[in-house]
Image (cartoon, rainbow, N blue to C red):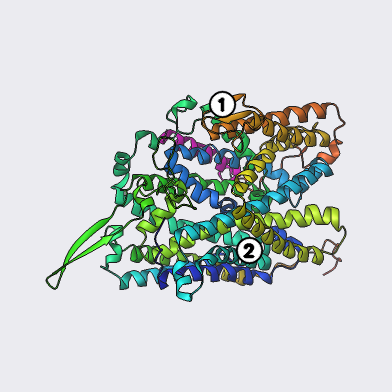
Amino acid sequence: MFGHTQLTAIDWLIMLLYFVFVLGIGVALKRYMKTSKDFFQAGRALPAWICGLAFMSANLGAQEVIGMGASGAKYGLATSHFYWIGAIPAMVFVGIFMMPFYYGSKARSVPEFLRLRFDEKTRALNACSFAVMTVFSSGISMYAMARLIQTLHIFDGLFVMLGLPLGWIFHFSMLLSAIIVLGYIFLGGLTSAIYNEVLQFALIIAGFLPLVLIGLHNVGGIHGLRAALPAAYLHSWRGMEHASTNPLGVDAFGLAMGLGFVLSFGYWCTDFLVIQTAMATDTQENARRVPLIAAIPKMFFPLLVILPGLLAIAATTPHNVTTETVVNGAIVRQTTVVSKAEAEGRGLVPAKTDPLTGKIVLDASGKPELDYDLAIPSLLLHYFPSGLLGLGLTALLASFMSGMAGNVTAFNTVWTYDIYQSYLHKGASDAHYLRMGRWATVGGILLSMATAYAATGFNNIMDTLQLVFSFVNAPLFATFLLGMFWKRTTGNGAFTGLIAGTAAAMAHHGLTLPIEAHPGLHGGWIAVLHHYPSDMAQNFWTAIWAFSANFVVAIVVSLFGQPKPESELVGLVHSLTPRAASEQNLWWKRPEALAVLLIGMVVALNLIFR
Amino acid sequence: MNLDLRIPMGLMFTLVGLILALYGWATQGSALYARTGNVDVNLLWGIVLFVFGLGMFLLGRRSEQKLRRQPRKVVVSNRPRPHGH
C-alpha cells in the first residue's frame, strides 16, 4: 500500500503539543469537578457557542471525516444530501421544538426523559440499548483509527528507530488513544469532553482547510475540477427523479423520507450523544440555540470533507517518474517509485489490496476496486510537506478521538444515572455517583478496547453491529414525536411501538436485498421478496418501515390504554406546556429567527448545487 | 465554568502557528514545496494560525480580566429583611 510516511521532528512536535493541551485541559478542569452535576452535566453552565461547536464535533467520528471523503470520491456532490437534507432540518427541529422539553423537564439524560414522559420499562430499554451502542461505537472509532495508523505507516519510522517490532503499532495506537481520551474525561468529565471537542473542531478546520486550498490549486481551481470530473459529480440533485438515474440508487421520496426525515431526525433529535452537549448550557433559551449554532458550520462542512474526495479523484494518478539532473558534469538519474495500489487507482484514490495476499482486488468486470476510505489520507500524504503533514495527521487523529469521547461521556452518564443509580444502587451519596462516573469512564474505555480487538478477530463484526444498531435506532423518532406532541401516548404504547419498529426493521432487511448482493449481511436472510438498486436505498426504506410500524403500533396500543394524568405531563408534552417567555424581546435575536435564516441558507445551497 | 476555553485554545494555535511559520521561514525555497506548486504553505498557514491563536488568547484574557474586575454577586436571601436600617 503506502510507503513509509516520513514524519520529521517538526511533525512529532505538533502532534505532541496537541496531546499536551488535550490532557492539560483535563488537568485544569479537575478542580471544578466537585459534584456529579459538574462531572456529568458540565454544571449546566457552559456558553452556547462552545456547546454548539461541541454538538457538531461530537458527531465527527471516523464515519464523518473518512466516510464522507470516501463517499465524495465515490458519488460526488450527491453526498451533500447527508448534510443539507440529512442534518440541518433535524438540527433546526430539535432546537426549536424538542429542546424545551429535554432541558425544561430537568431530565439528566434522554432515557431519564423517557421515564418522566412514559415509564420505567421504556427508559430501561432505551438506556440499555444506548449504553451498549455507545461502547461499541467508541470501539469502532478506536479500531478504525488503529487500522488507519497501521495502513499509513505513521508510526513505522518511530518504531524502527526505537527497535520495536512493527506488529505492536496496532496495540500502541489503541493504547495511546485510550489513555488520552480516558485521561481528559476522567479528570474533567463532560466539560473536558466538550472543551476538547471544540479544540478538535478547530484543529480539523486548521488541518483540512489548507488541504482543500492546495488540492484546488493543483487541479487548476474550480474550472480545473469541473473539467476533470464527469458532470454528474458536481450536482447534488441531478437524476434524483428515479433510483436508476443517480449514483446513490435512491429516488427523491426515499431520500427525503428515509434520510431527511426518519434517519436524520432519529439521530439528531434523540441521540443522547449530541443532546448531552446542548443540555450542558446555562439556560433553556441557549439550549435551543445550541443545535442552531451547530448547524452553521455543519452546513459548510461538505467543503472540508466531501470536496477533498472530489479533489482526490480529479488529481493526476501518480506513476513512476525518473528525473535527470547534472551534478558536477555527471548525469544523475533519480526514480520515484509509486506502489502498485497507487498506480492502479484513480486520481489519488488507491486500488484496494487484499490484506492477506497483498494483491489488487478486482471487481466483477475485472477492473481494480478502489479503496475510497483512503481518499482523504492519501490526499494528505500527497500534498502536505513536513510541518503541515504533522498538523493534518493530528487533525485526523483528533476526529477519531472526538467521536470516541462523545460516546464515552454519553455512556458514563447513562450507566451511572439510568442503570446504576436506578436499578443497582439507589440512594447513595452524590460523591459516590461522581466516583462511579469516573470508574464508568474507565470501564467504557476498556469495553471499547475489547470491541476493537474483537473486530480484529471476526471480519464482519463491525458491519453486523452497525446493522443491529440501525434496527434499534430506526424507529426511535416515532416514540419521541408521539411522546412530545400527543398527550394520549401511553408507556405501553411507546414500549410496544419500539419493539414493533425494531421487529419491522429486521423483517424488512431480512426480506429485501440490494441488486448484486448475496443474501446474508446485506439482507435477504429470510427470503428475497424485493430487490433495491443500492444498499443505501435498502437502508432508507428499512428506516421508513421501522418508523411507520412504531408510529402505528404506538397509537393503536395507546388508544386501548389509560394515559397519564395531564398534571404529570406539564413540561413534557407540547400542548400542556405553557410557552416560556423569550429572554430576548428583539425578534432577530430569538432562536426562531436563526432557524428561519438556516432554512433559507440550506434551500439556497440546494438550489446552487442542484 | 471558570476556565475560558479561548485561553488554552488560543495558546495552542499560537504555538502551532509559530512552529509552522518558523519552520516555513527556515525551509523557504526548499524542494519540500515542489508538491504544493512551490508555495511555502508552512509559512503562510503558520502566520494564519498564529494570528488566529493570538486573537483567541487575547479575547479570552480580556473576558477573564473583565470577570475578575466585576464585584462578586451577593447571594440574596429569601427571608424578609428586618425593617429599620
The residue at 29%/63% (across/down) is: B33
Tell me the amino acid under the disc marked 1.
Answer: His
Q: Is residue A317 magenta?
A: no
- Point out residue A573 in the picture as x, y percentages from the top left corner: 76, 38
**What residue is at 37 percent from the left and 60 percent from the top?**
A384
Q: Chain of mark 2?
A: A
Magenta highlight: main SS: helix
Q: What amino acid is found at the position of numbered circle 2 in the picture?
A: Ser
**Secondary structure of the residue carrying numbered label 2:** helix
Task: State the extent of the magenta-drawn residues as a range.
Answer: A586-610
Does residue A132 appear to the left or right of A406 in the view shown? right
Q: Nearer the viewer, residue A289 or A18?
A: A18
Tag 1 near tag 2, CB within 8 Å: no
User: What residue does disc 1 label?
Assistant: A531
Tag 1: Cα neighbours inside 10 Å, few (<14), some, or many (≥20)?
Answer: some
The residue nearer to you, when weighing A542 against A481, is A542
Q: Is residue A50 visible?
A: no
Quarter of the figure that contains the N terminus of chain A? bottom left
Q: Which residue is mark 2?
A: A192
Where is residue A237? Give x, y as percent: 45, 31
Occupied quadrant, residue A425: bottom right
Q: Earlier in the sequence, mark 1 or mark 2?
A: 2
Q: Can residue A93 be seen from the camera position used here? A: yes
Q: Is residue A590 magenta?
A: yes
